[in-house]
Image (spheres, rainbow, N blue to C red):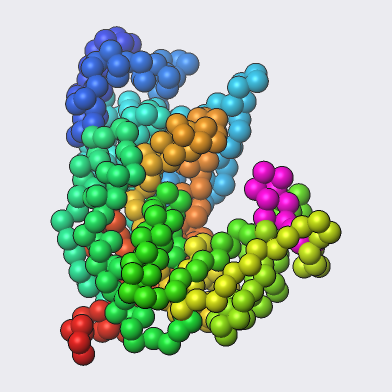
Amino acid sequence: MLGTNRMNSPQAFTAALYDALKPVNPGLEDLAIYEFRYGLDTVLPEGGWEALTLASQGDIEQLIASRVFYDSIQLKPRRGDKIVLDEKILHLTRMLLAGLARGVYPAAWVRAYFYFDIRGFLFFPRTVYFTPEVLSHFGSQPVQRFEPKQAQFERCQDLGYNDFMAANAEVDGAFIQGIQKIIARSQTPLLILIAGPTAAGKTEITERLGCALEHTGMSVTSIEVDNFMIDRERRDERAMGKTAMHFELFLNSLQAILQGKQIFIPRYDFIQATSSHDLQGQLRPGCKPLEVEPADVIFMEGNFPFQIEEISRLIGIKVVYLTDDPVRLKRKWKRDIDYRKKYDPAYFMNRYFRTQFLRADEIYLPLLKICDLCVDTTGAALWAAPEMAKILKRPVDS
C-alpha cells in the first residue's frame, strides 16, 4: 500500500504496484521489476499517478455493466498517423493500477471483475457467462465435470494450440462421446451447429468431432456460413444477419442437403471480399459455386443461425463451445498478431475490449439460454439442457 504523498516517487509507486498486482495476475511473478516498469511506462498518465482521481468501486461496476460505455469505445483513435488505445480504456486501467498501489481497491475485488493482460498491459472486464438464467436452463448442474486444467495458463503469456488442446482433452472427449450417443438416437441427415466466442476452439473441436464420427463409418460434411455473405461493400451498409447474406440461398441449401441432395452454394472470396453470386442470388459470369455432397452429419460453425427461426428449427444439435476471455485473448495474441499479423496491436486491444461485452450481451448469453449443449473448456464441464442430459446419462446399450 502506498500513501498519496509518495505517489510522485516513481520507484516507490512501481514497487508497491508490482506487489499489489501479483494476486490479480500471478504471471507477474515471472517478470523482473524493470520489465514491469517498461509496461507501466506505456500507461503513465500525463499528470502523473498522484494527480489521478479514483472512482468508487460501485461506479466502476456500473461503468463496465453499461452498454453505452462499450459503444463509446473507438476502435481506431489516432495520434498523428498512429492508431492508439482508446482513452477510456486507458483511464480505466490507470484507475485500477493506482487504486491497487494506494490500497483503495482490494486485489480480490479487482480480480473478481477484471483480468490483467500482461502483454497488452491493460485490464479487461470479465464476462460472466453462467448467469442465473443460463444455469437454470441447464438445470443448475453440469452433466460431467473434470479437473480445470486451463488454470495452468494463468501464468503463461505464450499459449499454443497443443497445450490448449491437451488441457481440454477430458471435456472434449466427453463432448465427442455425448454427440455420438445423441446421433445414435437421431435421424440422419443431422445438422449440428457449433457456436461460441472467437478463439474459443470451435474450428478445432469441429474437426476432431468430424474425424471421430468418420471412424464410426458415418459420412460427414460441413457448410461454412461465411460463404453465404454478400459483397463487403454492400454488407457494410446492412445489419448482420439475414440482410448481410444470401439468405434464401442459405435456407434453401440447408433444406436440400437435409433431404439428402447435393447442393451448390456461393463461394466467398475473402481477399477481394466479394461473393460468387450477385444480390439477386444469381451466379456471376466466370464464377464457380462450391459443391457440397450429402452426408449423415452436416457441421455448421457460426453464431447468428441460432437466432434466426427459419434456420434454428433445422438444426438438430445446438452447441456452444466456450472458453473464458483471458485464455481466448492469449490465443488471439498468438494467432492474429504473431502468426497472421492481422491487426495493429492498439486496434486489436480496442476491438477486443469493446466487442467482448457487446457480443456476450447480443449473442453468447442468448445462445447459452437456448442451446442443447455447452462445452465449458475453462471450467472443464459439459452442460446439457434437460432433454439432452437424459440421453447423455443413459447407459450406452440402453
Please determine whether, in this image, residue 312 is positioned above or below residue 354. below
- Please provide percent x and percent y for residue 277: 76, 62
* Residue 45 seen in the figure: yes
Decide which of 338, 350 is in the foreground and name it.
338
Residue 101 location, quadrant: top left
Is residue 209 covered in magenta? Answer: no
Please determine whether, in this image, residue 48 is positioned above or below residue 252. above
Residue 256 location, quadrant: bottom right
Is residue 274 covered in magenta? Answer: yes
Write the start and end of the magenta stretch as one range. Answer: 268-278
- Please provide percent x and percent y for residue 80: 65, 18
Q: Which quadrant of the figure contains the C terminus?
A: bottom left
Decide which of 291, 66 is in the foreground and name it.
291
- Please provide percent x and percent y for residue 259: 57, 85
Residue drawn at (36%, 39%), measured in percent from left and top? 330
Decide which of 167, 41 is in the foreground and name it.
167
Please determine whether, in this image, residue 145 is positioned above or below residue 95. below
Residue drawn at (33%, 30%), measured in percent from left and top? 118
Residue 343 lies left or right of residue 120; in this view the side is right
Residue 289 lies left or right of residue 169; in this view the side is right
Question: Residue at the bottom extreme?
Answer: 398
Residue 223 lies left or right of residue 65; in this view the side is right
- Please provide percent x and percent y for residue 189: 48, 82
Residue drawn at (45%, 15%), measured in percent from left and top? 47
Residue drawn at (55%, 30%), measured in percent from left and top? 344
Decide which of 332, 76 is in the foreground and name it.
332
Q: How many numbered marks are there?
A: 0
Question: Residue at the left extreme?
Answer: 147
* Residue 370 seen in the figure: no
